[in-house]
Each structure stands twice: as C-alpha cells, then as structure tokens.
Image: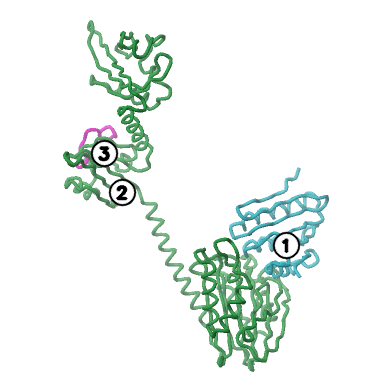
Chain colours: A green, B cyan
Amino acid sequence: MLDGRYHVLGVDAAFRTLFGELGPMVGRPFDEMVSDRDRRGAVALSQRLTRHHGEVIDLPLVITAGGRDRFVRARIAAVVASGDARFVAYLEPGEEQDSLTYELALARQRWSAIMQRSDEGIVLVDRDGTILQHNLRFFELMRFRTAHGVSLTEAALEGRRLGPLLPRAFEQLAQALARGDDDFELSVDSDGRMLEVEGRTLRFPLRGRVETLLLVRDVSEQRQIEQRDAIIQLDLEQAAAFQTALLSRMRWPSGLDVDVAYRPLQRVGGDVYDVAILPDGATRMFIADATGHGVTAALSTMLIKSEYDAVKLVGSPSEALAALNERITRTYARLAVMFTAAIVDISQDRRLLRHACGGHPAPLLCTGPRIVELAEGGPFLGVAMQQRYPEWTTEIEAWHSLVLVTDGVSEQRNASGAQFGDDRLRTAISEAVERGRKINASVLSRLDAYIATHAQTDDITLLTVQPAHT
Amino acid sequence: MTELPSHVADAFRATTRRDGRTLHLDLAGNADIQVAEPLHDLLAKLHAAAAELGIAHVAVDLRELEFMSSSCLKALVSWVSALQDTDYRIAFRANPDLRWQRRSLGALQTIAPGLVTVDGAT
C-alpha cells in the first residue's frame, strides 16, 4: 500500500510469501524499490508517476526485495481510503528468462533505447494515422507548426493524427498515409533541407494494417557531398581530357612506329612523355614521373611538360635534362616539383642512341628477343640547381625496339604483396617480340594477370618505339 | 633527455637508436605512399635530435626495405637537402639486390655530395 506521495505504507502477507520482508523500505518512496540494475525501469516509473492522472500504471520492473533483485510486473492503481488518496501496488513475480512478459519487457526496453538514441527521426502511427510513439529527433526534423506558423511543442504530438500536422512540403507523405501505402520512400525538400522518409507498414493476416513505422533522415549533407563529388568527378574528367590532349599533341617521326600505353592510377596521373623531331632529324623521346599521384602529380606534369617544351630542342639529352631541371627548380622552387626523367635520342639513320637519365629506370633496348638494359643514374629533377646528368651513347646495328617505362610498371604488386619486378617486365617484352605482338599491350596483359584483383598502386606508362619496317 | 623517434605501421617499420655520436635509423618493409607523412615527420624529429645531441653520423640501413614510394623518397630528399646547414653526415647502407635502391640512392647522393655516402648500391 502506498500513500498519496507513493511512499510505502506496508505490505500484505502475500508479498512476504513471495518476496520476503520489506524491511527498511517502509516509509520510503516506492520507486526506491526499483533495482539499481533497472535504470530504464526506474525512469519509466518516474515518468508515469509524474504524469499520473488516475489510470492504472502497468510496468515491468526489477525490484530489490528480500535481499535480491526480482523481476516483477508492477500495477499501481488509485484507491480511496478514509478520504485520503492512496495507491495499491500489485507486484506479480515474473519467471525471469522464461517469461514471455520478461521477453516483451526486454524487447520494449531495447526498442525504446534504440528509438531514443537513433540519429534518424522515428515515429509509429496506428492504422488511423494517430501518433503512437516518436523520438525527439523526429520532432526536431519535422519542425511542426500550427496553421498560424507557431511552433508546436513535442507534447502536442501525443495522441494526434500525423497527417494534419504535416507541413506542406510533406504532402506526398500525407497522401501515402491516407492511402494506406505499405512500403514507400520519399524525398522531401523542406526548409532548405533534403529529408528522406521511409515508411514500413506492419500487417497481420487477420487484422490487416496495424501500424506504420516512419523513418526520417536529413540527407542534406550527404546530397551536398554527392553534388561536390559529381563536380570533382567532372573536373577530373576535364583534367584527364586536358592531360590526354597535352600528351597526344606531338608529331610522330617518319620511319619509326611509336606506341604509348598510359594508365594513370586515378583519372589523371603523374607520368608525362613526349616524342619530338630534332633539327638534325634525330628523334627525341622523353619520359618523366612526378612524385605522388592524382591531381597534384597531374598538375606537376603540366609544369614539366610546359617547361620541357621550352627546352626539348636543346643540345644533347644530358643538356636538355639539365636545362629542364634548371627551369623547374628555379621557377617552381616553392612547389617542390620533384620528378625522375629520361631522354633518348635516336639518330636519323637509326644507328645511334644517346640517352641521359635523372633517377629514372633505364631504357630497355630490344635486339630481337634479347633485352639490353641501358645505363641509368643521375640526380632527381626539381630538387637542386646546377645538376649534371650523365649521358651514354650506344651504337645499334640491328634493333627491334626501344622501351621507356615508368617505375609503376615493375612496382605493381599482386595480392601477396610481391612486385611485378624488372625480370617479369623484361620477360614480357621478350615474349612479345618473339611472338610478333605489340609490346605495350602484351606487358599490360601480363601485368594485369599478375596483379589480378589487386588494385593498381601507381601510374603506368610505356613508351615504345621501333623501326617502321619491323 | 632527447627522445629518438620511431614509427611502426602494418608493413613498415622505422626504428632509431644511438651509439655515441652516431644515430642509427633502420627502415624495413614497404614504405608506401601512406607512410610518406609519418616518415617526413620522423626525419624532421631525427634531424632535430641529431643537432641537439651533437651527432656526427646518421647511419641509415635500408637492407630490409623492400620498396619506397616516390612520396617517401621525396621525404628523404628533403632531409638530405637540409644537410648543408648541419654538422652530421648520412651513410646509407643499401641492399644490392634491390634495383630501386641503387637508382634512387645514387640520385639522392648527388644532392649533397660529400655529405651522403651510399654503401652496397653497386
């Protein structure tokens, strides 16, 4: 028995039989009987007692009685005794783990916890569209107002039909509820926000539609990101088109077949190449690899290509690299455009090669199936001024092709982390020559088979030249 | 007391130790692009520690380093480029079986000739 302030006055014999002596609880508030383990139950009881208007309170609780925690169904009803307000609390022990009541209570508590903590607005409406339950996030997202534009309080939603409360922007939702649509998804543009509304209806075979669960989420930020991504994607495609145009703006030499395979890691890459005809009729091939990948590296390639165009007819390969390094290092010191590069000159009579490197993989000369790795060395470009680049001259009596690569080819890895490597690269070229196949396509095919499903990790460029008669 | 930096990631490890006036930096694994920033930071701290401790030599052991991305290489280049203003020298110990080391360390050496030596790259 409880007094008008819900303090415990005493217990009956049945209580003692079921739960033992109440002890020090006599005279204490009833909610102090709720176990410390049942925080949600204590909160629910407190809320119900605070808003109590005479109805029977019916709650699952864990109480501490007889020195231990017990799961009970608690029903509290008002009685009038001697003119004073009194309450009687019926405590019915549950069967803990086996009890359907317990399971239901647990499910209800879990549902309430999920609902209240959800980042999505959640509301349950019955078959007539009356609000049964909602969370705070739903109230915040919907920004309910009266017809006069006055904001509604959250309490004003209780027991109201949702349809008439919905702002004009939610007309489609109101129609879906009115029609009794089972499952639906809507996008709502409301107050400058983009909201997504998802409706899921619970139906029973005989009773039909029981209630509808509505989930409301603010996807404004997500949409903004998607729009921004789309713009970036478009920019990247344009940048890729620029880069392609830049790289293909060259005159192929007569008497030589040039083949380029360019596969950037992203839409744009940090590799750059060029083929030019020198005043003495020699063909000059240039390949470079800027540090990094993506847009930054691609912008570096624009600088490199533009500066290279200004010096590409300069003297020997070594002098051209030194001139390029000087221009880049002096002009763009703050940008720290570091890159590797190689230049190979093929004399007009196709019998002499002169080449220079700056930290770049050696050019590969194919004399039939045999692959000769030319010399390599030299400092990086873009790091320090007044650098010297070693130059080598090679006489070539009979040659099949010359292949310039960036390190992205041999440094690609398979799923187990093993690199494609220089040996596999040379083997792939050699086999392509033996079988009369296109070198670049064959290398890429072998490379793709090697890395299989593993993602490409660097930009890849192969620049192959061969006498036109072969 | 000056703390020596280190960095351990999934597939990369950079450890340092001091031996008198020599600092040892051992790099191992794969220095992918993700490692570039931590490596840059580590080298900056190492540089500061070397100055503070009056270090004469930094010995960098790359024999267990399978791969280094160009972005990580750039971090090494920045470090080596700053050598002109310091009192210590760098000695790289390379793995002759790894071609990228031969190529890249040769290029690195040209940035600060006399201050950087490379052993095992030929």
Q: Position of residue A436 (x, y in %)?
A: 54, 85
| SS at circle 1 | helix
Question: Does residue A169 appear to the left or right of A416 in the view shown?
Answer: left
Q: Residues within 10 Å of mark 1 (few under 14, many from 20)?
A: many
Q: CA distance from mark 1 to mark 2?
A: 57 Å
Determine the chain carrying the residue at label 1. B
Establish if B93 lies above or below A216. below
Task: Return the residue at label 3.
Answer: A124
Question: Can you tell which quarter of the image residue A388 is in?
Answer: bottom right
Q: Closer to the camera, A112 or A91? A: A91
Quadrant where the C terminus of chain A lies? bottom right
Establish if A217 lies above or below A357. above
Amino acid type of the residue that numbered disc 1 sits on in the rendered structure: Val
Q: CA distance from mark 2 to mark 3?
A: 23 Å
Is the residue at mark 2 from the same chain as the one at mark 3?
yes
Q: CA distance from mark 3 to mark 1?
A: 66 Å
Earlier in the chain: of badge 2 and badge 3, it is 3
| SS at circle 2 | loop
Task: Return the residue at label 2.
Answer: A191
Q: Is residue A95 visible?
A: yes
Q: Which residue sits at x=60%, y=53%?
A: B10
Determine the chain carrying the residue at label 3. A
Dot label at residue B80: 1
Dot label at residue A248: none
Determine the chain carrying the residue at label 2. A
| SS at circle 3 | strand
